[in-house]
Image (spheres, rainbow, N blue to C red):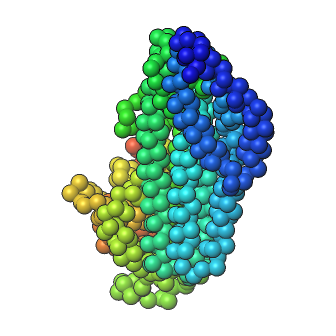
Amino acid sequence: RSTAVFGAEESPKVTAKVLRECFRPLLSSFTARLMSSANSNSATFSLEVISTTYKATLAFLSLAHDQVLGAGLEMIVDIFSVVASPFIPIIQDLVKQEVEHSYADFVRLENATKKTEEIFATNSSIQKTVDHLSLLCADIFPLAKGSLVRFEVFNCGCKAAATIANIDSRIGNHIAELSFAISTLSVSMTNEVNRAADKFDEQDVQGALELLQMAGMFVNDLQSFGVYTQERLRSLLAGLDASITLEREGAPDSLSTGEVGVLIARKTFREDSEVHSADLSSMCSVGSNQFHEENFPVSYQAGQKLASACRMFVFDLCYAVPRKWLASMSTLPEWTEKDDGNTDIMSSYSILPQSYITHVGEHILALVQALEPFASVESSLTLSKKAMQNMKFVAIEPWRDLASLIGLVQGEDDDVIDFLMEGKSLPDFVTISDFEEDEDEEDMDESHRFCNEWLGVISSAVTGRILERMLKIQALSEKGRDHLVTDINYIENVFSALGVSGHPHPLLSHFSTILTLNVDDLNDVLSKRSDLGYRGKMDGALVSAEIRIAKMRNVLL
């Protein structure tokens, strides 16, 4: 009828003005009600509900476009912006709205995370703690995806960097809370070493390894979410570029719901649309199936810390028994036990390994059976391997303690400490023993390699602590020396039985030999090292250790 009254040329403009006037009386009260609801955290009018209402509004405007087609794109966009004006404050400040919308969810997650230590302390098994943490870890991505979906609806690609940074921050902060909770559990096990060792159960190793699997799952989920985000950003970039082209070419015959949303978002921010386009383009500049770490730097770093915390938790659990039994090694009364006067060489063979070292050896051998069930499940193995980078550093503490005893300085001599810990090239420095080359592990299956990797770091920590405790022994009688050599030989046999690369460590055999040398032979070893010119700090450190052993034996050099 408007065409008959106003003519075909004027009719769309008149219809557009009528549309604007129809909505004008409603806008003020609807805006106030909408913003009040958005700030109330009400489930009835949550940001999710407002998002649904806004989508319905865009769908209505898409249909209305057919009636105002001839009014010109500029006038159409102005009227659409008026009709959608109650939603503009949310579009302009979406990040703030998202923070307020998700506040209750993140408080719930934070409170649940704080209960972790209580759950751990009140349950004999760690499985409930692991299940609790795994659920909390998985809860974050549905919240993040919901935030991304609402960004698509409201902002249509504009101000992408701020939204992605907010999502990144919320994921990263939550995972940091989980990492802290897990690290707190590790500290508890370290501080209450006797309790942790006495409670040790092989089934707990399975549970602890599930935490490692959880960390690997987070890495997977973050990568998947990152790829999904890039796909959505590409779609938004295409829509934004299409809208810029559409504006240059004039009003189209029809506008989809998404196209209406882009026009309103661009009008809202009143900035050069090409700035938003360039912003989006820089955030999805890699292949569609690749994770763009730069989009989620906080989450990525939090994931690395989560993996580190989970590795330490597994290590602290598996190392609890050795930690307990090696703690008092240097002060055992057997080291100063008086000789019984029996000089028969056979008497030295009758000395048995002491209980502290047999507890350690039996525990390490038992770990094989504790690790194998988990390693036999391919899916668990695949995820866990994603969280097993830089494994050797979980065992670094005993070696740093050893290094400080023999003149090496943490921070200044880290390369030498790593070299000492690795042990593979030590035969070049230890000139009195022959060492076998490590067996080739290339043909080893993943399950076997996984077990060996964990057995390797536990064995490394045990070795470092034994060497450090040995050098802290104040005095050794002849009988005490025989005890110590027997204990070292025992643990070397345990490591040999494991068949793990790098074990037994060359220093075990070397120190054992130093313990048995007479003063002339010991002086000969030191002079040979001097003749080689003390090849840097490694030779100096070894000489320091050898002299300490000589002094505890009361051998004058």
Side of 377 relative to 67 (left or right): left
Report x, y in % for residue 216. 44, 55
Residue occupying image coordinates x 49% and y 12% = 250
Residue occupying image coordinates x 65% and y 64% = 112
Q: Is residue 401 above or below residue 536?
A: below
Report x, y in % for residue 492. 37, 70
Q: In the rendered image, which quarter is residue 297 located in?
A: top right
Report whether residue 128 is seen: yes
Which residue is the extreme one toward the left?
443
Report whether residue 327 is seen: no
The front one of 13 and 499 is: 13
The front one of 202 and 171 is: 171
Report x, y in % for residue 296. 53, 39
The front one of 526 and 379 is: 379
Report the number of numbered marks: 0
Q: Is residue 198 above or below residue 38?
A: below
Give the quarter of the figure containing the N terminus.
top right
Report x, y in % for residue 515. 45, 68
Residue occupying image coordinates x 74% and y 39% = 30
Side of 222 relative to 448 (left or right): right
The front one of 403 and 452 is: 452
